[in-house]
Amino acid sequence: QVQLVESGGGLVQAGDSLRLSCAASGRTFSNVAMGWFRQAPGNEREFVAVISRLGTTFYADSVKGRFTISRDNAKNTVYLQMNSLKPDDTALYYCAADRNSILGARYYSVDEYAYWGQGTQVTVSS
């Protein structure tokens, strides 16, 4: 059974940092891209960051320069380091595994991903 389990969310103040983790089990994900998405109440799920199997990264403009995605294939884990958090970053954060071994041009689309975790809540107070 394939599982992605996020952790590390919490309630922080604006300007603080958090590191989210996504632990994968049931199969290895070292050969696919892994992404982070987020969803605030009333909004659609939106792309945050992605890391390819070779380590290439892409970020949403809203988090560029503040968030860093990384992966440890030996641990089958993906991380999202979030610095200088803002109230607008408040959302449920999900990790996801790509359907394909090659990162597609639509890496920002939820349709690109086959497996999803249950999410971890991040709340940033002003």
Image (tube, rainbow, N blue to C red):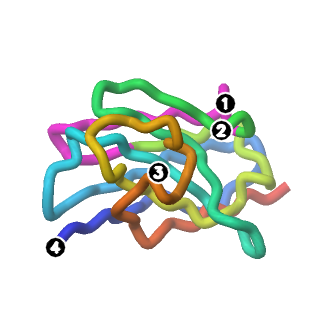
Q: Nearer the viewer, residue 64 or 20?
A: 64
Whichever of labels 1 and 3 marks the residue nearer the N terminus, that label is: 3
Dot 3: element = strand
Magenta span covers which residues?
63-78
Which is more foreground, mark 3 or mark 4? Answer: 4
Residue drawn at (66%, 63%), measured in percent from left and top? 91
Whichever of labels 1 and 4 marks the residue nearer the N terminus, that label is: 4
Q: Which mark is residue 106?
A: none
Left or right for 11, reference 74? right
Q: Which residue is mark 3?
A: 20
Q: Are marks 1 and 2 in contact (CB under 8 Å)?
A: yes
Question: What's under tag 3, amino acid-wise?
Answer: Leu
Q: Which residue is mark 4?
A: 1
Q: Kindly report the distance in space between the C-alpha atoms of the residues bearing marks 1 and 4.
A: 34 Å
Q: Residue furthest front?
A: 105
Residue drawn at (65%, 38%), measured in percent from left and top? 60
Q: Which mark is residue 60?
A: 2
Q: Which mark is residue 64?
A: 1
Whichever of labels 2 and 4 marks the residue nearer the N terminus, that label is: 4
Q: Kindly report the distance in space between the C-alpha atoms of the residues bearing marks 3 and 4.
A: 22 Å
- Above/below status of 71 relative to 2: above
* Residue 58 image position (x, y, % from top left): 54, 31
Residue drawn at (49%, 46%), measured in percent from left and top? 19
* Residue 62 image position (x, y, % from top left): 74, 39
Residue 116 figure quarter? bottom left
